[in-house]
Amino acid sequence: MFEDLEWNPDLVPPLKLGLHLAQILFAFIIFCLEISVFTDKDSAVVGKNGWTFGVCFLSIPAWLYLSMAPRFPRTRKLANPHVMACIDGLYTILWLSAFSTQASYNTANLCGNACGQSKAIVGLGFFVFLFFAVTTFISIYTVKYFKWNGTLPGYENIKPRAHNIDPDKAAFSMAPHDEEAYAPVGMNDQDNDHRGSLHPDEHDYDSTVAGGSHVGAYSDHGSYGRRDGRGAQENPFGHDNPFESDTEYHSHQQGGAHVYAPPSVHDDYDDDRPAHFPAADYDRVTR
């Protein structure tokens, strides 16, 4: 039977996962509807509908194992194909009994005013049973495929999602997100020395304003100041080089450099002196 079945094994993981997700969704709806049946004042809470309600919880470990174990490389060694086929077959029987007992509950007229919800539980329970029957068939195919190839069908080809995100390509990165993101940056030391030089005699700067006056001009000798109409320069700094240390400049302006020193702390606390509580009316304190 399975030898003549031509089926793409890569379809097994998504198909089986989709069926288990549908089972979980329907079971959750059954769980909610069963609570509405329990809360109805005219309906009876007996073992029949209690069993249907309990199967929803009993199926959680099976869904976790059947859906998650074969999908990840670290847990794939736990995904034994024979065990998965047995679990699918077992829960097919459990859900058959679950919707059957709910149908028997309705036949006994125990649902009161919540018979509509109880009938919906029977219909959804039948579909969960049907989905488990299909997953059981797929698990049997998985067992045969494992015997022929030694691997699970399709699960070995699942590529894990990459988590190493380039920080320069992150969503909120300030780096450009185009083909120029990794363009080489000129790191010539000579260019840096030329641009970052602080010697004004190497660069002459002259800014022209209205009326032909020149403000902020460097002379050929490195002096900086305001040039009037006669060409004379007035140096507001009091010295030729404006790039000298700030200490010297402030010494001309404030009469000398001031070095920061942390304030001294005077600790007058005496460790040998007994502790004194603040003055208060302590007689008002009660136990």
Image (cartoon, rainbow, N blue to C red):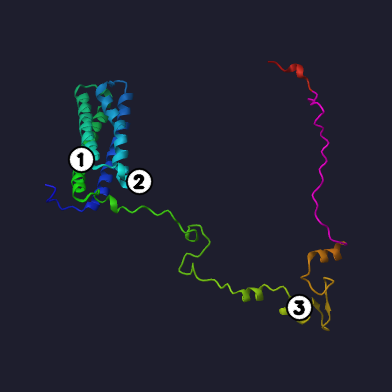
Q: Are marks 1 and 2 in contact (CB under 8 Å)?
A: no
The residue wearing badge 1 is 136
Q: Badge 2: how crowded within 10 Å, few (<14), some, or many (20+)?
A: few
The answer to which quarter of the image holds residue 26 is top left
Between disc 1 and disc 2, whose residue precedes? 2
Q: Is residue 272 magenta?
A: yes
Specify whether 150 is left or right of 72. Answer: left
Q: Badge 3: how crowded within 10 Å, few (<14), some, or many (20+)?
A: some
From the viewer's perspective, is the residue at label 3 or at label 2 nearer? 2
Q: Is residue 204 visible?
A: no
What is the CA distance from the residue labelled 3 to the residue labelled 2?
72 Å
- The stretch in magenta equals 255-279
Disc marking residue 74: 2
Where residue 30 appears, x then y in whole percent? 29, 33
Q: Residue at x 26, y 51 (%)?
A: 154
Badge 2 marks a residue whose secondary structure is loop
Disc marking residue 217: 3
Q: Amino acid at mark 1?
A: Thr
